[in-house]
Image: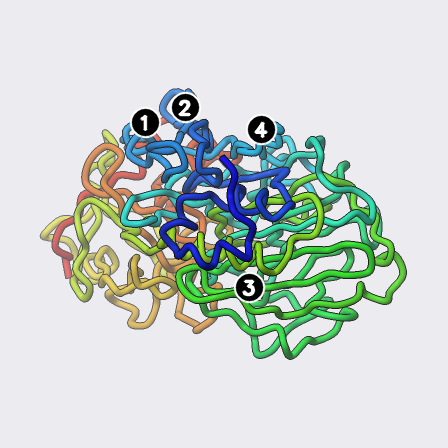
Amino acid sequence: MQYPRPSKLFALGLASIAAAGPCDIYSSGGTPCIAAHSTTRALYSAFSGSLYQVKRGSDNTTTSIAPLSAGGVANAAAQDTFCANTTCLITVIYDQSGRGNHLTQAPPGGFAGPESNGYDNLASATGAPVTLNGQKAYGVFISPGTGYRNNAPSGIVKGDAAEGMYAVFDGAHYNDGCCFDYGNAETNSLDTGNGHMEAIYFGTNTAWGSGAGSGPWLMADFENGLFSGQGSKNNAGDPSISYRFFNTILKGGPNQWAIRGGNAASGSLSTYYSGARPTASGYNPMSKEGAIVLGIGGDNSVSAQGTFYEGIMTSTYPSDATENSVQANIVAAKYATTALTSGTALTIGSSISLRATTSGYSDRYLAHTGSVVNTQVVTSSSATSLKQQASWTVRAGLANGGCVSFESKDISGSYIRHADFVLQVGANDGSKLFKEDATFCPQAGLTQGISIRAWGYPTRWIRHYSNVGYVGSNGGVHAFDAASSFNDDVSFVVSTGFA
């Protein structure tokens, strides 16, 4: 099938644009996709192959998730069935372009990942639920320490040759770590010098550049610099972003580059910068190497966070008209938020207690002694002070109102939070980090009752281990991540609070 040129696409209306996928539109503009990644939908109208692969914790088997139909939304129901009553990780994000440029667990580089072998963590398969045109799908929720990479892809642009790329991100999920990137990077996972990368960056890092306001900003990672415009300084034309779904665009060629962006749920694109390459040594000409990264920097810097839904890379420099048509296609996909919780609903403002369900520990409740979160045996005849220590007031999530936070019943203004994956009770200091670490998303229990995952680390769940509280992952590197009895240890029965 031949698709019309971008100038004609506007006249066809959104219904016709939506019939073509983003990569069909790029191809019609003479700038074909050479990599296409999405866990939410097909990016070609005829694509019906695998979008991504998940691995479940119960038996470490994998399955691949395809669209419901050619060109359609991912079959989230198939994932939900496969992952029922266990944990699941995203192991592969498949390339839809046919070039085999799949993204897998990033290996160690200049910075080692947190896995025992130096690899990065894999993302939870359920951490970023959304809907597209009312159909459920899952994005890729990148926590610090998580990353995907392909150091030997086929056909990715190298040197000073022109390329383009876009990615749809969660505009509310970011930090100032280095670096939440998607795009072209070094093939050896090391910092090999200025100009050896060309990747989309999103966050609030100000070490090299910034935009208007306090961020977050779309910038370009060219290695050893995050650029919002000419030079590595502030570009007042690069706005702070407040869109829940954010379409980010970066393109570059010989002594030219541009960043563009827009609300992925409505409206059109704006150009934040278009002009010459940075004047510092190494950026003109560029020395792009042609690897692909997601969620990390070119040297495997792993301290950033963000959420990825879809993205592509092209050969040659796309026109604004082509990108405008792709923006219309993304808007027509109707990204929308959906529930972050499941199972037994917790009523905001209610007082609850959480009883352990692991055999031999089912008389113990999640409580605290000072700042230490632990489990203690509590009964109706226990001292009032202990009953208060084992009771929690449910509050709207401090970082995300779709989840919850647990305020201490006996220390007003203090909440359960995790720090270095250990649970503690601390006073809310108002910081972004505290709010994120004190936000949890209850789910239907892996064995019974409810299980409570950490909002910012959705591979991790509130767990009791040796009677101490942690946020543990199923089979991770720490002793409290042990797979043995994991499902039981993260399942709690909710009751009315003792106090």
Position of residue 289 in the picture relative to residue 141 (left or right): right
N-terminal of the two: label 2 or label 3?
A: 2
Position of residue 492 in the picture relative to residue 171 (left or right): left
Which color scheme is applied?
rainbow
N-terminal of the two: label 1 or label 2?
A: 2
Between disc 4 and disc 2, the foreground one is: 4
The quadrant holding residue 79 is top left
In the foreground, 479 or 241: 241
CA–CA distance in space, label 3 to label 4: 27 Å
Tell me whether the residue at label 1 lies in contact with that at label 2, contact meaning CB atoms closer than 8 angstroms: yes
- Tell me the element at label 2: strand
User: Image height check: is 473 above or below 298?
Assistant: above
N-terminal of the two: label 4 or label 1?
A: 1
- Tell me the element at label 1: helix
Q: Which label is found at residue 63?
A: 2
Residue 112 can be seen in this image: yes
Q: Which label is found at residue 261?
A: 3
Amino acid identity at mark 3: Gly
Amino acid identity at mark 1: Phe
- Disc 3 residue crowd, few under 14, some 14–19, many 20+, Cα 10 Å: many
Position of residue 252 in the picture relative to residue 138 (left or right): right
Q: Mark 1 highlights which residue?
A: 82
Q: Mark 4 highlights which residue?
A: 98
User: Residue 492: x percent and y percent?
Assistant: 23, 42
CA–CA distance in space, label 4 to label 2: 20 Å
